[in-house]
C-alpha cells in the first residue's frame, strides 16, 4: 500500500490504480465527475483534474487534506525537489518577451484560429516563421514548432527543444469521437472551417507499443471512445493508418476507425476548403454511426 492509497483509504475515497497515476473522482465540489478524471502522482501526490483543471496551485493531495504526517517523508521531499527542478526547466519554454502575436490569415486559415493557439512570430530565433507553443494535457509548453512561411525554403519545420516526445495536440474534452490528423496545419484548417473535434499527432512514426496508451490516456479519461484516423489517402498513408489503428486497438480502450478514404482525391486535410470540410464532417458522422451499429 502506497502513501497515496493509504490516505485515500483513510478518507474513504474510491480510486483506480492504472499502474501509473491513480485515478479518482474530482475533488472540486462544483464538478460532477461521472467518469473519474483526477490523476494523482503515486509518489509526489501532485494532482490535476484533466476535465476542469482542479489542483493547479496546490502542492499535493497531502496539502489539500492537510495531512502533515504524509508529506514529510524524505522520499517525498526528494520528489518535490525533482518536480521543482522540472518546473524551473519548464520556465525556459515561456513564449519570448519579444514575440509578436501572429494576427494574419495564412494558408486559408483565419487569424483568429492562429490566435486561439497563441501563434507568434519572433525575429531573433524564428525569423520568417509562424511559431506554435505545443502543450501537454495540463497546459505546460513542451516545445515550440515553427513553420517557415515560405514553403519552398527548407527546413519547412523547426522544433525546439528537439528531443521531446510530442503529445496528441490539443487535448479535446467532452469529445466522444475524435478525428486524428497528422500535421498541425491539417488540424488548424479543419478547425478553422468548423470541425472542432480534431487533434494532430505530428506524424505516426512517434507511436509505439510502449507509448501509445500514455499518448491517448488524456483523451480516454476525458471521454473519447472512438478515434477516426484521417491521414493522406495514398499507399503510405493507408499503411500508416492501419498500423496506428492496430496499436490503438491493442493498447487502449478507444475504438479506431480508418477514414483516409473520406478525403477528396489528391487532397489532405490541410488543403480542404470550407465546403469540403462540411462534407467531411457529415461523412465522419455517418462512418461513426455505421461503426457503432456493428
Image: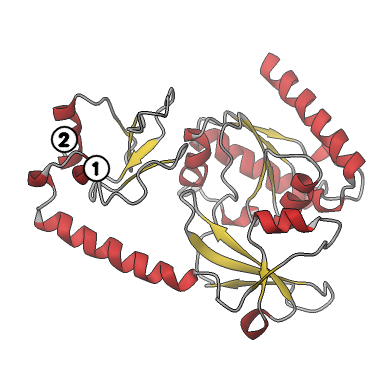
Eyeballing the image, is 111 above or below 39? below
Residue 62 screen position, x and y as percent: 19, 44
Ranked by sequence position, the earlier of labels 2 and 1 is 2
Q: Which residue is mark 1?
A: 61
Task: Residue 7: give its label.
Answer: 2
Q: In the rendered image, which quarter is residue 255 located in?
A: top right
Q: Nearer the viewer, mark 2 or mark 1?
A: 1
Can see residue 77?
yes
Residue at 82% over, 46% down: 233
Label 2 packing within 10 angstroms: few (<14), some (14-19), many (20+): some
Can see residue 294?
no
Quarter of the image containing the N terminus? Answer: top left
- Residues 104 and 10: in front is 104
Q: 225 left or right of 119?
A: left
- Label 1 near label 2: C-beta < 8 Å? yes
Residue at 52% over, 72% down: 161
Residue at 17% over, 28% down: 11
Label 1 packing within 10 angstroms: few (<14), some (14-19), many (20+): many
Residue 56 screen position, x and y as percent: 37, 49
Q: CA distance from mark 2 to mark 1?
A: 9 Å
- Residues 276 and 105: in front is 105
Quarter of the image containing the C terminus? Answer: top right
Q: Residue furthest bottom?
A: 124
Q: In the rendered image, which quarter is residue 225 located in?
A: top right
Q: 121 left or right of 28?
A: right
Q: In the rendered image, which quarter is residue 280 located in?
A: top right
Colouring rule applied to residues: secondary structure
- Residues 22 and 233: in front is 22
Amino acid at each position: 500500500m502506497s502513501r497515496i492509497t493509504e490516505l485515500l483509504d483513510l478518507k474513504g475515497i474510491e480510486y483506480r490504480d492504472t499502474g501509473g497515476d491513480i485515478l479518482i473522482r474530482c475533488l472540486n465540489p462544483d464538478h460532477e465527475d461521472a467518469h473519474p478524471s483526477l490523476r494523482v502522482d503515486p509518489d509526489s501526490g501532485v494532482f490535476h483534474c484533466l476535465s476542469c483543471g482542479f489542483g493547479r496551485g496546490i502542492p499535493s493531495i497531502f496539502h489539500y487534506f492537510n495531512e502533515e504526517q504524509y508529506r514529510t517523508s524524505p522520499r517525498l521531499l526528494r520528489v518535490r525537489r525533482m518536480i521543482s527542478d522540472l518546473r524551473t526547466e519548464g520556465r525556459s519554454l515561456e513564449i519570448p518577451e519579444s514575440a509578436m502575436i501572429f494576427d494574419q490569415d495564412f494558408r486559408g486559415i483565419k487569424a483568429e484560429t492562429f490566435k486561439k493557439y497563441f501563434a507568434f512570430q519572433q525575429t531573433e530565433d524564428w525569423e520568417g516563421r509562424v511559431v506554435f507553443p505545443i502543450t501537454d494535457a495540463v497546459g505546460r509548453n513542451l516545445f515550440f514548432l515553427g513553420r517557415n512561411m515560405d514553403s519552398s525554403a527548407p527546413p519547412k519545420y523547426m522544433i525546439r527543444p528537439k528531443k521531446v516526445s510530442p503529445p496528441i495536440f490539443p487535448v479535446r474534452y467532452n469529445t466522444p469521437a475524435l478525428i486524428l490528423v497528422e500535421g498541425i496545419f491539417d488540424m488548424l484548417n479543419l478547425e478553422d472551417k468548423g470541425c472542432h473535434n480534431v487533434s494532430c499527432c505530428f506524424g505516426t512514426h512517434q507511436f509505439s507499443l510502449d507509448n501509445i496508451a500514455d499518448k491517448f490516456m488524456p483523451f480516454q479519461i476525458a471521454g473519447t471512445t472512438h478515434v477516426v484516423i484521417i491521414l493522406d489517402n495514398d499507399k503510405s498513408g493507408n499503411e500508416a493508418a492501419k498500423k496506428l489503428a492496430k496499436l490503438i486497438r491493442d493498447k487502449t480502450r478507444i475504438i479506431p476507425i480508418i477514414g483516409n478514404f473520406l478525403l477528396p482525391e489528391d487532397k489532405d486535410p490541410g488543403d480542404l476548403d470550407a465546403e469540403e470540410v462540411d462534407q467531411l464532417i457529415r461523412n465522419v458522422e455517418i462512418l461513426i454511426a455505421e461503426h457503432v451499429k456493428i
